[in-house]
Image (cartoon, rainbow, N blue to C red):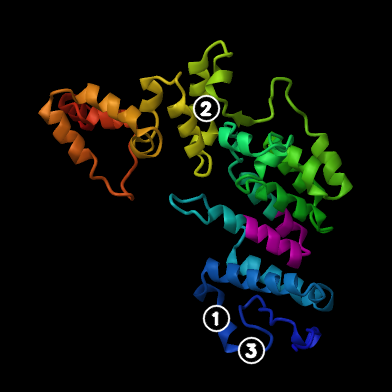
Amino acid sequence: MRAPETDAQTPATPDASGRSPSGHPGTAQRPHQRTQASFRRTLHHIAHRVHNNPRLADLAADQLHAAADALVTCGQLLTWADEQENDYEFEGRVLRLAEDLVLLSANPDHLAGACAQLARLDPPAVVSPKPSRTLIRVLDNVDPDHDRPARLLERHSEHRRVQALTVLASNPHTPRPAVADVLGGLHPAELAWIAEKAGGPDWLLAAAAAVPVPEDEDDGVVRLVDDEELGKRPDPAAVLQSWLDSPAAGEFLSRSEVYRAVVKSRYRTLEHLRQIPADEVLARHEPEVALTILLEHCGRSTKRWEALAAAMTFDYDDEKITFGQLLDSLDPALAEAQTS
Protein backbone atom coordinates (compact mmCIF):
# COMPACT_ATOMS: atom_id res chain seq x y z
CA MET A 1 0.00 0.00 0.00
CA ARG A 2 1.30 3.41 -0.87
CA ALA A 3 2.27 5.46 2.14
CA PRO A 4 0.29 8.68 2.66
CA GLU A 5 2.05 11.73 1.33
CA THR A 6 3.71 14.04 3.83
CA ASP A 7 5.52 17.31 3.53
CA ALA A 8 8.60 15.34 2.53
CA GLN A 9 6.71 14.02 -0.45
CA THR A 10 5.21 17.26 -1.72
CA PRO A 11 5.69 17.90 -5.42
CA ALA A 12 8.83 19.78 -6.33
CA THR A 13 7.86 23.35 -7.16
CA PRO A 14 9.88 25.55 -9.51
CA ASP A 15 11.15 28.94 -8.51
CA ALA A 16 11.03 32.03 -10.72
CA SER A 17 14.02 30.79 -12.72
CA GLY A 18 12.17 27.65 -13.75
CA ARG A 19 14.45 25.38 -11.66
CA SER A 20 13.00 23.24 -8.89
CA PRO A 21 14.45 23.57 -5.37
CA SER A 22 15.89 20.08 -5.74
CA GLY A 23 17.67 21.03 -8.93
CA HIS A 24 15.91 18.27 -10.82
CA PRO A 25 17.18 18.36 -14.40
CA GLY A 26 13.66 17.94 -15.79
CA THR A 27 12.74 21.41 -14.53
CA ALA A 28 16.05 23.16 -15.11
CA GLN A 29 14.90 25.00 -18.23
CA ARG A 30 15.08 28.76 -18.23
CA PRO A 31 11.78 30.64 -18.71
CA HIS A 32 12.54 31.68 -22.29
CA GLN A 33 13.13 28.02 -23.18
CA ARG A 34 9.68 26.97 -22.01
CA THR A 35 6.42 27.56 -23.81
CA GLN A 36 3.32 28.95 -22.16
CA ALA A 37 1.74 25.52 -22.59
CA SER A 38 4.58 24.00 -20.56
CA PHE A 39 3.92 26.36 -17.65
CA ARG A 40 0.22 25.57 -17.86
CA ARG A 41 0.89 21.85 -17.73
CA THR A 42 3.16 22.20 -14.72
CA LEU A 43 0.60 24.29 -12.87
CA HIS A 44 -2.16 21.81 -13.68
CA HIS A 45 0.01 18.86 -12.61
CA ILE A 46 0.60 20.42 -9.20
CA ALA A 47 -3.08 21.32 -8.83
CA HIS A 48 -4.01 17.76 -9.72
CA ARG A 49 -1.75 16.46 -6.96
CA VAL A 50 -3.38 18.82 -4.46
CA HIS A 51 -6.86 17.87 -5.64
CA ASN A 52 -6.07 14.17 -5.07
CA ASN A 53 -4.41 14.81 -1.70
CA PRO A 54 -6.00 17.91 -0.09
CA ARG A 55 -3.65 17.70 2.91
CA LEU A 56 -0.89 19.10 0.72
CA ALA A 57 -2.68 22.46 0.73
CA ASP A 58 -1.89 22.77 4.44
CA LEU A 59 1.41 20.87 4.60
CA ALA A 60 3.06 22.83 1.78
CA ALA A 61 0.98 26.00 1.55
CA ASP A 62 3.93 28.40 1.20
CA GLN A 63 5.63 26.26 -1.43
CA LEU A 64 2.45 25.88 -3.43
CA HIS A 65 1.70 29.59 -3.35
CA ALA A 66 5.24 30.41 -4.45
CA ALA A 67 5.09 27.85 -7.24
CA ALA A 68 1.78 29.21 -8.52
CA ASP A 69 3.09 32.77 -8.48
CA ALA A 70 6.25 31.77 -10.35
CA LEU A 71 4.43 29.76 -12.99
CA VAL A 72 1.79 32.41 -13.64
CA THR A 73 4.37 35.19 -13.83
CA CYS A 74 7.06 33.43 -15.85
CA GLY A 75 4.55 31.75 -18.13
CA GLN A 76 2.47 34.93 -18.53
CA LEU A 77 -0.56 32.73 -18.01
CA LEU A 78 -2.89 35.66 -17.39
CA THR A 79 -1.90 37.47 -20.58
CA TRP A 80 -5.03 37.39 -22.71
CA ALA A 81 -4.85 36.15 -26.29
CA ASP A 82 -7.95 36.12 -28.45
CA GLU A 83 -9.36 32.77 -29.49
CA GLN A 84 -8.02 31.53 -32.79
CA GLU A 85 -10.10 29.75 -35.41
CA ASN A 86 -10.45 26.01 -34.79
CA ASP A 87 -8.90 26.33 -31.32
CA TYR A 88 -11.43 24.05 -29.65
CA GLU A 89 -9.50 23.90 -26.36
CA PHE A 90 -9.47 27.66 -25.79
CA GLU A 91 -12.33 27.83 -23.30
CA GLY A 92 -11.12 24.71 -21.51
CA ARG A 93 -7.69 26.29 -20.92
CA VAL A 94 -9.24 29.41 -19.39
CA LEU A 95 -11.52 27.37 -17.13
CA ARG A 96 -8.75 24.99 -16.09
CA LEU A 97 -6.43 27.88 -15.19
CA ALA A 98 -9.10 29.37 -12.93
CA GLU A 99 -9.73 26.03 -11.26
CA ASP A 100 -6.01 25.42 -10.74
CA LEU A 101 -5.44 28.85 -9.19
CA VAL A 102 -8.29 28.26 -6.75
CA LEU A 103 -6.32 25.32 -5.34
CA LEU A 104 -2.85 26.83 -5.44
CA SER A 105 -2.91 30.61 -5.30
CA ALA A 106 -3.18 33.15 -2.52
CA ASN A 107 -2.30 36.05 -4.82
CA PRO A 108 -5.29 38.44 -5.07
CA ASP A 109 -4.02 39.93 -8.34
CA HIS A 110 -3.73 36.54 -10.00
CA LEU A 111 -7.13 35.41 -8.74
CA ALA A 112 -8.67 38.65 -9.96
CA GLY A 113 -6.99 38.09 -13.30
CA ALA A 114 -8.62 34.66 -13.54
CA CYS A 115 -12.00 36.30 -12.89
CA ALA A 116 -11.34 38.82 -15.66
CA GLN A 117 -10.55 36.00 -18.10
CA LEU A 118 -13.83 34.27 -17.29
CA ALA A 119 -15.65 37.51 -18.04
CA ARG A 120 -14.14 37.61 -21.54
CA LEU A 121 -15.37 34.16 -22.52
CA ASP A 122 -18.35 34.02 -24.86
CA PRO A 123 -21.67 33.73 -23.02
CA PRO A 124 -23.49 30.42 -23.32
CA ALA A 125 -26.20 29.81 -25.90
CA VAL A 126 -29.02 28.21 -23.95
CA VAL A 127 -31.55 26.23 -25.97
CA SER A 128 -34.73 24.49 -24.90
CA PRO A 129 -35.21 21.72 -27.49
CA LYS A 130 -38.49 20.81 -29.08
CA PRO A 131 -40.42 18.22 -27.04
CA SER A 132 -39.68 14.70 -28.21
CA ARG A 133 -42.87 12.85 -29.07
CA THR A 134 -41.06 9.55 -28.50
CA LEU A 135 -39.94 10.50 -24.99
CA ILE A 136 -43.38 11.87 -24.14
CA ARG A 137 -44.88 8.50 -25.06
CA VAL A 138 -42.24 6.48 -23.20
CA LEU A 139 -41.83 8.55 -20.05
CA ASP A 140 -44.82 8.87 -17.76
CA ASN A 141 -43.13 11.27 -15.36
CA VAL A 142 -41.35 13.95 -17.39
CA ASP A 143 -39.21 16.11 -15.11
CA PRO A 144 -41.24 19.31 -14.52
CA ASP A 145 -37.99 21.27 -14.08
CA HIS A 146 -36.45 20.21 -17.39
CA ASP A 147 -37.17 23.62 -18.93
CA ARG A 148 -35.69 25.73 -16.14
CA PRO A 149 -32.77 27.92 -17.33
CA ALA A 150 -30.34 26.51 -14.77
CA ARG A 151 -31.13 22.94 -15.85
CA LEU A 152 -30.90 23.82 -19.56
CA LEU A 153 -27.51 25.43 -18.95
CA GLU A 154 -26.14 22.05 -17.89
CA ARG A 155 -27.35 20.17 -20.99
CA HIS A 156 -24.10 20.81 -22.86
CA SER A 157 -21.95 21.64 -19.80
CA GLU A 158 -22.38 25.34 -20.48
CA HIS A 159 -22.46 26.00 -16.75
CA ARG A 160 -18.70 25.55 -16.45
CA ARG A 161 -17.91 29.27 -16.64
CA VAL A 162 -20.23 30.21 -13.79
CA GLN A 163 -19.14 27.10 -11.89
CA ALA A 164 -15.50 28.22 -12.13
CA LEU A 165 -16.50 31.70 -10.93
CA THR A 166 -18.29 30.17 -7.96
CA VAL A 167 -15.21 28.18 -7.03
CA LEU A 168 -13.02 31.29 -7.36
CA ALA A 169 -15.39 33.11 -5.02
CA SER A 170 -14.83 30.37 -2.44
CA ASN A 171 -11.11 31.19 -2.27
CA PRO A 172 -10.78 33.73 0.57
CA HIS A 173 -7.98 35.54 -1.29
CA THR A 174 -10.13 36.31 -4.35
CA PRO A 175 -11.16 40.00 -4.28
CA ARG A 176 -14.93 40.23 -4.07
CA PRO A 177 -15.10 43.25 -6.42
CA ALA A 178 -13.41 41.14 -9.11
CA VAL A 179 -16.14 38.52 -8.80
CA ALA A 180 -18.88 41.17 -8.73
CA ASP A 181 -17.55 42.65 -12.00
CA VAL A 182 -18.08 39.29 -13.70
CA LEU A 183 -21.59 38.83 -12.31
CA GLY A 184 -22.85 41.89 -14.18
CA GLY A 185 -22.00 40.32 -17.54
CA LEU A 186 -23.34 36.83 -16.95
CA HIS A 187 -26.13 35.26 -18.99
CA PRO A 188 -29.49 35.25 -17.15
CA ALA A 189 -29.33 31.45 -17.02
CA GLU A 190 -25.92 31.63 -15.33
CA LEU A 191 -27.33 33.91 -12.63
CA ALA A 192 -30.18 31.45 -12.20
CA TRP A 193 -27.63 28.64 -11.86
CA ILE A 194 -25.89 30.46 -9.00
CA ALA A 195 -29.18 30.82 -7.16
CA GLU A 196 -30.28 27.22 -7.69
CA LYS A 197 -27.15 25.12 -8.02
CA ALA A 198 -24.00 26.86 -6.88
CA GLY A 199 -24.01 26.41 -3.13
CA GLY A 200 -21.36 29.13 -2.96
CA PRO A 201 -20.65 31.60 -0.15
CA ASP A 202 -23.58 33.70 1.06
CA TRP A 203 -22.05 36.94 -0.19
CA LEU A 204 -21.91 35.52 -3.74
CA LEU A 205 -25.57 34.50 -3.66
CA ALA A 206 -26.50 37.95 -2.41
CA ALA A 207 -24.38 39.70 -5.04
CA ALA A 208 -25.87 37.58 -7.84
CA ALA A 209 -29.40 38.31 -6.64
CA ALA A 210 -28.60 42.03 -6.60
CA VAL A 211 -27.54 42.19 -10.26
CA PRO A 212 -30.00 44.61 -11.90
CA VAL A 213 -32.30 43.05 -14.51
CA PRO A 214 -33.76 45.23 -17.29
CA GLU A 215 -37.55 45.20 -17.37
CA ASP A 216 -37.66 43.89 -20.94
CA GLU A 217 -35.09 41.11 -20.39
CA ASP A 218 -36.27 37.50 -20.63
CA ASP A 219 -34.50 34.42 -19.28
CA GLY A 220 -32.17 34.28 -22.29
CA VAL A 221 -33.34 30.84 -23.42
CA VAL A 222 -34.04 30.09 -27.09
CA ARG A 223 -37.10 27.87 -26.90
CA LEU A 224 -37.62 25.67 -29.92
CA VAL A 225 -41.32 24.85 -30.18
CA ASP A 226 -43.26 22.59 -32.52
CA ASP A 227 -45.55 23.73 -35.32
CA GLU A 228 -48.65 23.43 -33.14
CA GLU A 229 -47.21 26.05 -30.80
CA LEU A 230 -45.78 28.13 -33.67
CA GLY A 231 -49.24 28.32 -35.22
CA LYS A 232 -50.43 30.24 -32.18
CA ARG A 233 -47.87 33.00 -32.77
CA PRO A 234 -48.77 36.10 -34.85
CA ASP A 235 -45.85 35.52 -37.23
CA PRO A 236 -44.42 31.97 -37.14
CA ALA A 237 -41.87 32.74 -39.89
CA ALA A 238 -40.49 35.61 -37.79
CA VAL A 239 -40.07 33.26 -34.84
CA LEU A 240 -38.05 30.88 -37.03
CA GLN A 241 -35.90 33.80 -38.15
CA SER A 242 -35.31 34.80 -34.53
CA TRP A 243 -33.93 31.31 -33.91
CA LEU A 244 -31.51 31.67 -36.83
CA ASP A 245 -30.47 35.13 -35.61
CA SER A 246 -29.82 33.96 -32.04
CA PRO A 247 -26.34 33.16 -30.67
CA ALA A 248 -27.48 29.53 -30.46
CA ALA A 249 -27.24 29.25 -34.26
CA GLY A 250 -23.53 30.00 -34.04
CA GLU A 251 -22.67 27.64 -31.20
CA PHE A 252 -21.24 24.23 -32.05
CA LEU A 253 -23.27 22.36 -29.44
CA SER A 254 -26.67 23.93 -30.18
CA ARG A 255 -26.72 25.01 -33.81
CA SER A 256 -27.74 21.61 -35.18
CA GLU A 257 -30.82 21.64 -32.93
CA VAL A 258 -31.76 25.07 -34.25
CA TYR A 259 -31.26 24.07 -37.89
CA ARG A 260 -33.27 20.87 -37.43
CA ALA A 261 -36.19 22.75 -35.87
CA VAL A 262 -36.26 25.28 -38.73
CA VAL A 263 -35.94 22.73 -41.53
CA LYS A 264 -38.65 20.48 -40.11
CA SER A 265 -41.16 23.29 -39.62
CA ARG A 266 -43.91 23.72 -42.18
CA TYR A 267 -43.60 27.47 -41.64
CA ARG A 268 -40.07 27.63 -43.04
CA THR A 269 -39.47 29.41 -46.30
CA LEU A 270 -36.74 29.17 -48.89
CA GLU A 271 -35.23 32.30 -47.37
CA HIS A 272 -34.84 30.47 -44.07
CA LEU A 273 -33.17 27.50 -45.76
CA ARG A 274 -30.79 29.74 -47.70
CA GLN A 275 -29.22 30.87 -44.38
CA ILE A 276 -28.48 27.33 -43.15
CA PRO A 277 -25.22 25.51 -44.01
CA ALA A 278 -25.68 23.43 -47.13
CA ASP A 279 -24.61 20.15 -45.54
CA GLU A 280 -27.24 20.57 -42.80
CA VAL A 281 -30.00 20.92 -45.41
CA LEU A 282 -28.72 18.30 -47.85
CA ALA A 283 -27.85 15.43 -45.57
CA ARG A 284 -28.73 15.86 -41.93
CA HIS A 285 -32.29 17.16 -41.78
CA GLU A 286 -35.13 16.30 -44.16
CA PRO A 287 -33.01 15.74 -47.32
CA GLU A 288 -36.18 15.36 -49.42
CA VAL A 289 -36.82 19.07 -48.83
CA ALA A 290 -33.51 19.91 -50.47
CA LEU A 291 -34.17 17.44 -53.27
CA THR A 292 -37.45 19.13 -54.18
CA ILE A 293 -35.81 22.55 -54.26
CA LEU A 294 -32.88 21.33 -56.36
CA LEU A 295 -35.21 19.65 -58.86
CA GLU A 296 -37.10 22.89 -59.29
CA HIS A 297 -33.94 25.00 -59.42
CA CYS A 298 -31.96 22.88 -61.88
CA GLY A 299 -34.86 21.72 -63.99
CA ARG A 300 -33.66 20.61 -67.43
CA SER A 301 -30.47 22.65 -67.30
CA THR A 302 -27.50 20.33 -67.89
CA LYS A 303 -25.08 23.04 -66.82
CA ARG A 304 -26.78 23.47 -63.47
CA TRP A 305 -26.75 19.74 -62.77
CA GLU A 306 -23.06 19.60 -63.69
CA ALA A 307 -22.38 22.57 -61.42
CA LEU A 308 -24.25 20.81 -58.60
CA ALA A 309 -22.19 17.65 -59.07
CA ALA A 310 -18.98 19.71 -58.88
CA ALA A 311 -20.20 21.59 -55.80
CA MET A 312 -20.97 18.33 -53.98
CA THR A 313 -17.32 17.27 -54.00
CA PHE A 314 -16.29 19.55 -51.12
CA ASP A 315 -14.27 17.97 -48.31
CA TYR A 316 -15.13 18.06 -44.62
CA ASP A 317 -12.41 20.63 -43.91
CA ASP A 318 -13.46 22.93 -46.74
CA GLU A 319 -15.06 26.24 -45.91
CA LYS A 320 -18.74 25.73 -45.19
CA ILE A 321 -21.20 27.37 -47.56
CA THR A 322 -24.86 28.08 -46.97
CA PHE A 323 -27.63 26.44 -48.93
CA GLY A 324 -28.26 29.81 -50.56
CA GLN A 325 -24.63 30.07 -51.70
CA LEU A 326 -24.91 26.58 -53.14
CA LEU A 327 -28.01 27.50 -55.14
CA ASP A 328 -26.40 30.71 -56.41
CA SER A 329 -23.27 28.81 -57.48
CA LEU A 330 -25.42 26.74 -59.87
CA ASP A 331 -26.24 29.85 -61.90
CA PRO A 332 -23.11 30.78 -63.91
CA ALA A 333 -24.05 34.45 -64.08
CA LEU A 334 -24.63 34.76 -60.33
CA ALA A 335 -21.51 32.74 -59.50
CA GLU A 336 -19.37 34.95 -61.72
CA ALA A 337 -20.83 38.11 -60.19
CA GLN A 338 -20.10 36.87 -56.64
CA THR A 339 -16.46 36.03 -57.40
CA SER A 340 -15.70 39.23 -59.33
Picture coordinates of residue 324 (x, y %)? 32, 28
- Which secondary structure, mark 1? loop
**Tags 2 and 1 touching, CB below 8 Å:** no
* Residue type, label 1: Gln
* Marks 3/1: CA–CA distance: 10 Å
Q: Main secondary structure of the magenta part?
A: helix
- Which secondary structure, mark 2? helix
Q: Which residue is mark 1?
A: 29
| 74 up-or-down from 276: above or below | below
Q: Write down the quadrant of residue 185 in the picture.
A: top right
Picture coordinates of residue 4 (x, y %)? 79, 84
Residue extent of the magenta highlight: 95-113
Q: Which residue is mark 2?
A: 243
* Residue type, label 3: Gly
Q: Write down the quadrant of residue 206 in the picture.
A: top right
Picture residue at 67% right of the left edge, 78% below the top: 15
